[in-house]
């Protein structure tokens, strides 16, 4: 049983919610939230330990592991696809050297379990687009994707070479209503809800028929905690599990929003992110995750839309957005 968890990149879209999910499992004092930007929301600073950490600062990473007697690490700090294409060298530096720091320090200090997410960005234009298999061609066309494939291979290598316990999910686009996304291609699927509530219309940076796999945050939290708690002996895969929930195009997402906001309007002005989206799968075969650790999503498109509009609508009424 893991006793003390260090979360790196805990202030981002996923970390700001995953930290609280893990605190429910391990206890508030046993989950240390860290980020380069330590301006955490009050809910995180008020109920448990936090610290500033640059994952590239190996000495501070070691110091925090010793200070808190850490035995599990969740490493979320990364540059995502759209920001990564604007500065590929920066994306390589953070994504690869950050991951190597975590793996090496974890190896030296005997950390018992590590979770490092991958992404559907690990796939590329030569991968089958529909029901993309678990074990398939990984030839991404973005620097972000290159770092995700390399991260998966490194994770699997450390499992095989050093007998370490490393786990990872190929997250689809994550849709959430707490912290805004940090510069990806699937960000439109979050922005559309804020603009729908605030303005009744949205201009999308992808074409109307661009189909991508997506997942609502409660399912992302469930997938991550379920995999982290799964029996290692039952896992045949390690650092890059496919996980699916639903697949959607901007046009279909707009139609789902119209079920609740009938006058919602969408227009399209594709930019450089279209080429990234075009290189990613339409849908995911996640049978390995279902078989090896019991993955099953709860939210479909309309259930997600209804909940997103409810929560963002409440924030809008309170003047918070
Ligand atoms: P995000 O950009 O919202 O958050 C990343 C966090 O890392 C930020 O809070 C940032 O301040 C922090 N950070 C940046 N540089 C750092 C550094 N040097 N040291 C420490 N922290 C640093 O990203 P996210 O969406 O929460 O993604 C988390 C992980 O999940 C990433 O590995 C990402 O590739 C993966 N992922 C996310 C999605 C998604 O849709 N959100 C999909 C697939 C994979
Ligand atoms: C991005 O769009 O870059 C991320 C991802 C799917 O990895 N949301």
Image (cartoon, rainbow, N blue to C red):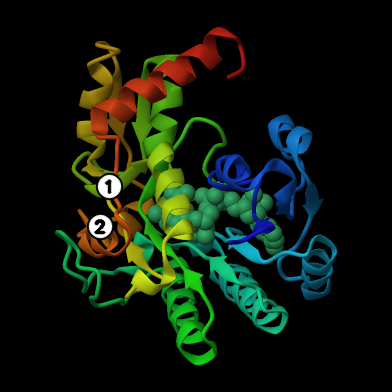
Residue at (23% x, 47% y) in the render: 210
Image x and y of residue 217, in percent: 43, 39
Which numbered tag is attached to residue 290? Answer: 2
Query: Is residue 82 something one can see in this rendering?
Result: no
Ligand 1 is in which quadrant of the figure?
Answer: bottom right
Which numbered tag is attached to residue 296? Answer: 1
Query: Is residue 237 something one can see in this rendering?
Result: yes
Rendered image quadrant of residue 79: bottom right
Q: Residues within 10 Å of mark 2 (few under 14, many from 20)?
A: some
Image x and y of residue 63, in percent: 84, 69
Q: How crowded is mark 1: few (under 14 residues within 10 Å), some or many (20 or more)?
A: some
Residue at the farthest bottom position: 161
Rendered image quadrant of residue 130: bottom left
Q: Is residue 279 left or right of residue 82?
A: left
Image x and y of residue 211, in percent: 22, 47
For marks 1 and 2, give the CA distance: 7 Å
> Which of the two discs, 1 and 2, labels the residue nearer the N terminus?
2
Q: Quadrant where the N terminus lies?
A: bottom right
Q: Quadrant where the C terminus lies?
A: top right
Front residue (pair 108, 247): 108
Residue at (73% x, 53% y) in the render: 34
């Amino acid at each position: 049983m893991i006793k003390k968890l260090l979360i790196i990149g805990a202030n981002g879209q996923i970390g700001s919610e995953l930290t609280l999910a893990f605190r429910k499992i391990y206890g508030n004092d046993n989950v240390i939230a860290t980020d380069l930007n330590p301006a955490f929301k009050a809910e995180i600073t008020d109920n448990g330990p936090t610290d500033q950490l640059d994952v590239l600062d190996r000495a501070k990473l070691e110091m925090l592991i010793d200070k808190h007697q850490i035995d599990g690490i969740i490493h979320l700090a990364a540059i995502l696809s759209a920001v990564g294409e604007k500065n590929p060298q920066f994306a390589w530096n953070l994504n690869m050297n950050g991951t190597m720091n975590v793996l090496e320090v974890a190896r030296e200090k005997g950390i018992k379990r590590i979770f490092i997410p991958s992404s559907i960005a690990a796939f590329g234009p030569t991968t089958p687009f529909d029901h993309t298999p678990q074990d398939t061609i990984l030839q991404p066309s973005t620097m972000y994707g290159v770092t995700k494939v390399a991260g998966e291979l490194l994770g699997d290598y450390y499992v095989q070479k050093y007998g370490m316990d490393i786990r990872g999910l190929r997250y689809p686009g994550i849709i959430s209503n707490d912290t805004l996304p940090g510069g990806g291609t699937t960000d439109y699927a979050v922005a559309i809800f804020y603009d729908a509530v605030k303005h009744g219309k949205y201009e999308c940076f992808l074409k109307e028929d661009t189909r991508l796999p997506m997942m609502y945050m409660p399912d992302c939290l469930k997938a991550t905690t379920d995999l982290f708690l799964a029996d290692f002996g039952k896992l045949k895969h390690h650092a890059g599990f496919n996980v699916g929930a639903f697949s959607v195009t901007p046009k279909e997402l707009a139609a789902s929003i119209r079920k609740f906001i009938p006058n919602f309007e969408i227009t399209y002005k594709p930019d450089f992110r279209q080429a990234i989206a075009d290189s990613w799968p339409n849908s995911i075969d996640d049978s390995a995750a279902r078989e090896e650790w019991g993955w099953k999503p709860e939210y479909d498109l309309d259930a997600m839309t209804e909940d997103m509009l409810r929560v963002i609508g409440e924030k809008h009424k309170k003047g918070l957005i």
